[in-house]
Image (spheres, helix red, strand yellow):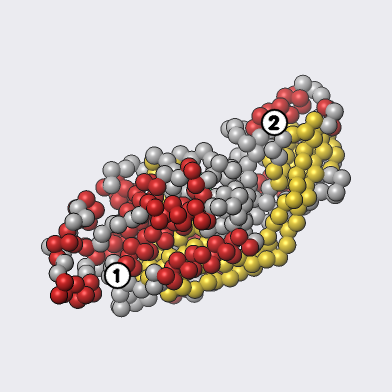
Amino acid sequence: MKRRIIGLLFAAILVPALFLSTSCSLQLKSKISRDDFVPDFSQERMLETIKILSAEDGGRIAGFAGEKAAAEYIAGRFREMGLEVSEQSFPIKSFTCNSVSVDVISEAGKKIEGAKALTYSAATPPGGIEAELISLGFGTAEEYKDKDAEGKIALMKRGGEYFYIKTARAYEMGAAAVVFYDPDGGEAVSATLTKLSAIPAVSISHANGEMLENSIKDGDKVEIRVVVDSITEDSTSSNVIGLYKAAKNTGGMRVIVGAHYDGVDTPAANDNASGIAAIIEMARALSDQRIPLPYDVMFIAFGAEEIGLVGSTTFVNRMRIDEKDSVLAMLNLDMVGVGNSFELYTVDEGSSIRFRDMAKETLNQMGYAPLILTTDRSDHAPFAFAGIQAVFIQAGPYDAYHTDFDTLSVIQPEVLVKICEFGTRLLVEKLPLWVE
Ligand code: BES
Ligand code: ZN
């Protein structure tokens, strides 16, 4: 039986032991077939990886020393397991915010606690911007029809269009600054404008957003002061690439397994030290066992995802056409360490469906019914837009997204093991069917 069902092997780890004999174990190793892959994923090793990467709050923000240190650490881990390691560096704009404050002048300067600047928010003058607040719903073009935002501060709900589009519209309509809150609840969100905005943009909690909306509704003239002390400057980030050379005659064919390693201003344990821990563990298992595959596997830790998918976009933009053609599939792991169900995303309903169905079938065989969704908010997107079969897997639900609660303590290591099992099933059992 050439291709035994791998499920049996995942259930029975004992099998390889039967073949072990001291006299021929070396020879046996070189002959190992991928049917003999043993899913020996370690929860401890993955937790340790996450512990190291998430040790500091805001420790992996794109373009700063902590992101570079993380890249070095990942490169070291890839090297240690014998992968061919390379780093692809690229220019980015780094963003730091020293302080943010929002005060309600019309209420004796009452302070709005927990305000955050959006990444790439323009700074205010040192004394801040003081103006009347205007309520603009979701900030759509429609909302401005019979309102005058000139010189005012625009209060908007999160949702619908991107933050940068709503901010640019507010600027065009003459607004002096923008304040966002999430209508679905929660603290002030950490989000990005992807490039320097013309006017300052901050976020506040749901409760504070509602409070301000109510004051405006009551007919009061609400005046606020927004102060943002931020710096946007030139820096660099990099993608760390570990190539697992699986067999001799791959004809240059490859599968990409990626995860971003940068973070927002949180410990960023689940988003996305979890994905990095999982790709390192998968790479380790494959290379330890020298599993032969009909393609090379490129493990990529992407930099600068959180500021606009910059690492993955750069990687795709720098691929030659023949290189793009040689990518069989791309699997993206982002937020894979918490939850009780799995979510599979393609960028839309029309692309990467073949790979998405394969991923879905794999999860079904593992006993899961994944949610099937679409998003372009992670590193699979640039690959999918370049015509590559690209799927993003996430575990969920996850409440601590982009908050300071995104720490090691929320990670469920058994979920990480499932993710590794899923990923290696695709690599070892399923994707080979496309080339043989
Ligand atoms: N892991 C998130 C993306 C995500 C969050 C997908 C929740 C699905 C549900 C990712 O790291 C992220 O935050 N991405 C940015 C993308 C943007 C910079 C293009 C985002 O969504 O704000
Ligand atoms: Zn992420």
Above or below, comparing residue 428 to residue 268 in the picture: below
Type of amino acid at the residue the image marks with label 1? Arg
Identify residue for label 1: 290
Task: Name the spot of residue 90 as percent of width and height, x first.
Answer: 61, 69
Above or below, comparing residue 85 to residue 215 in the picture: below
Closer-to-camera residue (163/115): 115
The reply, left or right, for residue 265 in relation to residue 243 is right
Task: Name the spot of residue 6 as percent of width and height, x first.
Answer: 22, 56
Closer-to-camera residue (120/390): 120
Q: Residues within 10 Å of mark 1 (few under 14, many from 20)?
A: many
* Furthest residue toward top: 218
The reply, left or right, for residue 427 in relation to residue 325 is left
State the CA–CA distance, disc 1 to disc 2. Answer: 56 Å
Residue at horizontal 45%, vertical 45%?
A: 411
Residue at horizontal 37%, vertical 76%?
A: 252
Above or below, comparing residue 378 to residue 411 in the picture: below
Closer-to-camera residue (45/118): 45
Disc 2 is placed on an element classified as helix
Type of amino acid at the residue the image marks with label 2? Asn
The answer to whether the residues at label 1 and label 2 have Cβ atoms under 8 Å apart is no
Q: Residues within 10 Å of mark 2 (few under 14, many from 20)?
A: some
Residue 208 has which mark? 2
Residue at horizontal 53%, vertical 45%?
A: 407
Quadrant hosting residue 27? bottom left
